[in-house]
Image (spheres, helix red, strand yellow):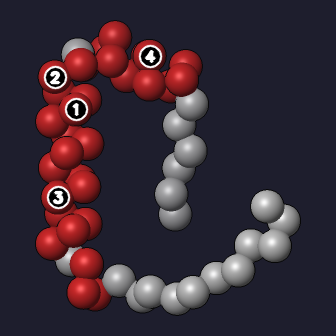
């Protein structure tokens, strides 16, 4: 499950661990996801509420 983090959450995280660590960790997670891209279930969805 994906957790939503808002501006206040990000501010607290940056204050606790520092901007460099936050960005480095986020980049690592993004890279790991892209390396697994072929294993993701990809489906087309239609959101008519927009």
Quadrant of the drawing holding the C terminus: bottom right
Q: Mark 1 points at which residue?
A: 23
Q: How many other residues sit within 10 Å of disc 1, few (<14), some (14-19) or many (≥20)? A: few
On screen, 49 above or below 6?
below
Kind of element beneath mark 3:
helix
Which residue is depicted at the point 21% across and 77% down?
36
Q: Distance between the residues labelled 1 and 2?
A: 5 Å
Q: How far apart are marks 1 and 4 (CA)?
A: 13 Å
On screen, 41 above or below 32?
below
- Tell me which numbered mark, 3 or 4, is placed earlier along the sequence: 4
Question: Where residue 35 appears, x then y in whole percent?
Answer: 15, 72
Residues at marks 1 and 2 touching, judged by CB atoms closer than 8 Å = yes
Q: Name the residue under label 2.
A: 20
The answer to whether residue 19 is left or right of residue 8 is: left
Q: Mark 4 points at which residue?
A: 11
Kind of element beneath mark 4:
helix
């Amino acid at each position: 499950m994906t957790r939503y983090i808002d501006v206040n959450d990000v501010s607290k995280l940056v204050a606790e661990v520092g901007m460099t660590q936050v960005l480095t960790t986020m980049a690592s997670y993004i890279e790991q996801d892209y390396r697994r891209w072929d294993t993701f279930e990809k489906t087309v969805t239609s959101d008519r509420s927009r």
